[in-house]
Amino acid sequence: MKILKQQDITRFIAVKFSNHNCECCGQRDWQVAGEENIDAKGTAGHIDLIGFRHGGLIANDISKAITLGVCVVACLNCGNLKLLGRQIVANWVDQNPA
Ligand SMILES: [Zn+2]
């Protein structure tokens, strides 16, 4: 799995969100969320959401869980969060190297 760095996602946001105002507050001030988790190499990137396929939800049975990699983007004005498909961001980074 390609390691995404904060600057990769920041470049993605700059291109893809440049004309996108926050649907909650109308501002246009997006930033990669969760920066407190960025390590010294600037690796940020993504989190894994845990979920269950239809009918697979069994309380406390984490072995039934699947994960979905997402990048989290926040509106700095109101805190609205967006989840971006990690693989799509990674593909864009591959096609648009810094
Ligand atoms: Zn907002």
Image: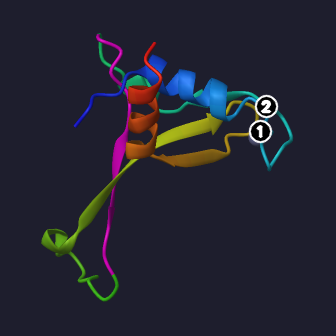
Name the residue: 79% across, 34% down: 19
Q: Amino acid at mark 1?
A: His
Q: Is residue 71 placed above or below 85 in the rendered structure? A: above
The Cα atoms of the two marked residues, 2 and 1, are separated by 7 Å
Do the numbered discs 2 and 1 sit on residues whose CB atoms are within 8 Å? yes
Q: What span is colored magenta in the figure?
A: 41-53
Residue that carries the numbered disc 2 in the rendered image: 28
Sequence-first tag of 2 and 1: 1
Tag nearer the camera, 2 or 1: 1
Report x, y in % for residue 26.
86, 41
Cβ of mark 1 under 8 Å from ligand 1: the answer is no
User: Which of the 4 image quarters holds residue 13?
Assistant: top right
Q: Is residue 85 placed above or below 75 in the rendered structure? A: below
Name the quadrant of the N terminus. Answer: top left
Label 1 element class:
loop
User: Which of the 4 image quarters holds residue 2?
Assistant: top left
Q: Is residue 58 placed above or below 47 in the rendered structure? A: below
Report x, y in % for residue 75.
69, 36
Q: Residue furthest left?
A: 63
The front one of 4 and 72 is: 4
Name the residue: 28% across, 28% down: 3
Residue that carries the numbered disc 1 in the rendered image: 20
